[in-house]
């Protein structure tokens, strides 16, 4: 018989906000693989104007985004698409992608990874963003720098 895990409840005051080094973005873990039996990893993000990570590819995880407020420009494969609040974007593993806030106000979103396991990438980038390529490789993520 499988044991039932304890429910996870994260109130706004319980979130640990972590700067990522990616354009001033702030991420807060809502559910890690430890809470989801490695099923998924869920993050709340605030993306300031000009924020967003460089283009990248995940080789281990599917990634999905739900935009709560603001607008973001997503690169998915070779296509750029602007999305607003209420939009959902799913990115299969192996597909190059990024998001960028080209607007004048903060964007707020949730994003998921399935399966879990990439949580450490965000923690490590918050501590040493200048090692983005090395840290990415450790977690099966390749970054692409434009311009």
Image (tube, helix red, strand yellow):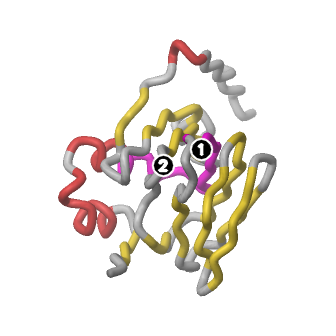
Asked if residue 114 lies left or right of residue 1, the reply is left
Identify the residue at image location x=58%, y=74%. 75
Identify the residue at image location x=54%, y=55%. 101
Residue indicated by mark 2: 49
How far apart marks 2 and 1 lie (CA) works out to 8 Å
Q: Which mark is residue 33?
A: none
Residue closest to the far right = 86
Residue closest to the far bottom = 78
- For discs 2 and 1, the disc positioned in front in the rendered view: 2
The stretch of residues the image draws in magenta is 106-122
Task: Answer with mark 2 or mark 1, whichever residue precedes in sequence.
Answer: 2
Residue closest to the far top = 13
Quarter placement of the N terminus: top right
Identify the residue at image location x=69%, y=72%. 81
Residue indicated by mark 1: 107
Quarter placement of the C terminus: bottom left
Identify the residue at image location x=71%, y=26%. 4
Judge the density around disc 2: few (<14), some (14-19), many (≥20) Cα neighbours within 10 Å. many
Which element carries disc 2, helix, strand or loop? loop
Q: Is residue 92 magenta?
A: no
Q: Position of residue 25 (x, y in %)?
A: 43, 44
Q: Is residue 84 above or below residue 26?
A: below
In the image, 8 versus 44, the foreground residue is 44
Q: Quadrant of residue 8?
A: top right
């Amino acid at each position: 018989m499988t044991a039932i895990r304890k429910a996870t409840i994260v109130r706004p005051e319980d979130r640990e906000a972590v700067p990522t080094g990616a354009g001033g973005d702030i991420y807060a873990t809502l559910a890690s693989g430890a809470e989801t039996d490695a099923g998924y990893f869920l993050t709340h993000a605030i993306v300031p104007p000009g924020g967003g990570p460089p283009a990248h590819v995940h080789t281990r995880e599917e990634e999905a985004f739900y935009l709560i407020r603001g607008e973001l420009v997503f690169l998915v494969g070779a296509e750029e698409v602007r999305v607003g609040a209420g939009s959902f974007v799913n990115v299969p593993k192996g597909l190059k992608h990024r998001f960028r806030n080209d607007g004048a106000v903060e964007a707020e979103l949730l994003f998921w990874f399935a399966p879990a396991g990439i949580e450490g990438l965000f923690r490590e980038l918050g501590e040493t963003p200048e090692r983005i390529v090395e840290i990415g490789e450790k977690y099966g993520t390749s970054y692409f720098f434009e311009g």
